[in-house]
Amino acid sequence: MASLGIDVLFKGTNFLRLLQGLWVSIEISLIAVVLSIVLGLLVGMLMTVENKLLKVILKIYLETVRIMPQMVLLFIVYFGTTRVFGWDMSAESSAIFVFTFWGTAEMGDLVRGSIKSIPNIQFESAFALGMDKIQTYLYIILPQTVRRLIPLSINLITRMIKTTSLVMMIGIVEVLKVAQQIIEANRKVSPNAAFGVFAVVFLLYFLVCWPISRLSVYLEKRWA
């Protein structure tokens, strides 16, 4: 095992530090996903509103998120807001903001698609029963939309957990940053540390993301 460089993880608190770094990634992802679901529902409903100006604004927002790399957004928010506007945003807050900004656009587009896929007869039936638009969305449309979105939302968690590896670029000590620190500290005594440490990081990501991914597939099949 020593030749693989895994032994360095069992020196001192290295493995515990690696787990703590993994939790940082998971924590940022979970907070961002919860905020993205709530805001995404609102944005998705706004996307179905017949208002040209609103549609243009939301289209620009969606295309910006799709075109702009998350790393660039992280740099703009973390470094740009501090220097240009003088805001004192922590690296963690910047990461949560960027991932929520990204996730809200993703969820909003999914919500829009789910609402559009609901037959018009359901809207007409609700109006015929005397419901107004808010009641129709609250009691008929949103419950169906949320049910369809839960598997996709779970899938978004795995995507965010993997993408949080970018936050090390703004100084957040997540799992990859910890792995780099361990490798650098043991480079002379264990030349193969990079292989062993990153293999364990791969395994940790797999153990976290695979069950979540399978849950998403299960719910998608069950609720299809």
Image (tube, grey):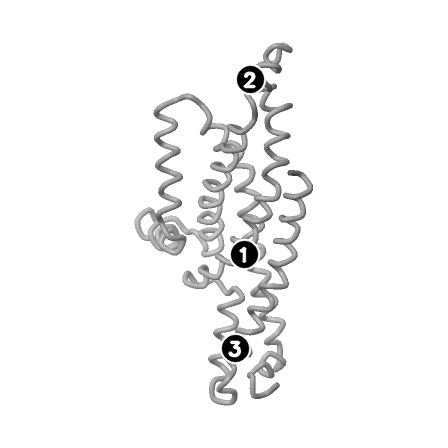
User: Which tag, 3 or 1, sits closer to the chain's start?
Assistant: 1
Where is residue 100? Give x, y as percent. Answer: 49, 45
Crowd tier of the residue under label 1, counting other residues whose Cα lies within 10 Å: few below 14, some 14–19, many 20 or above: many
Alpha carbons under labels 2 and 3: distance apart: 57 Å
Q: Which of labels 2 and 3 is toward the front?
A: 2
For the point 58% across and 63% down, the residue is 205
Where does label 3 land, which residue? 182
Q: Amino acid at mark 1?
A: Ile
Crowd tier of the residue under label 3, counting other residues whose Cα lies within 10 Å: few below 14, some 14–19, many 20 or above: many
Where does label 2 land, which residue? 133
* 118 sits left or right of 109 in the view: right
On screen, residue 199 above or below 162: below
Where is residue 154? Give x, y as percent. Answer: 60, 47
For the point 35% across and 51% down, the residue is 76
* Quarter of the figure that contains the N terminus: bottom right
Q: Which residue appears farthest toward the right when viewing the image?
A: 222
User: Which tag, 1 or 2, sits closer to the chain's start?
Assistant: 2
Alpha carbons under labels 1 and 2: distance apart: 37 Å
Q: Are marks 2 and 3 in contact (CB under 8 Å)?
A: no
Numbered mark located on residue 161 in the image: 1
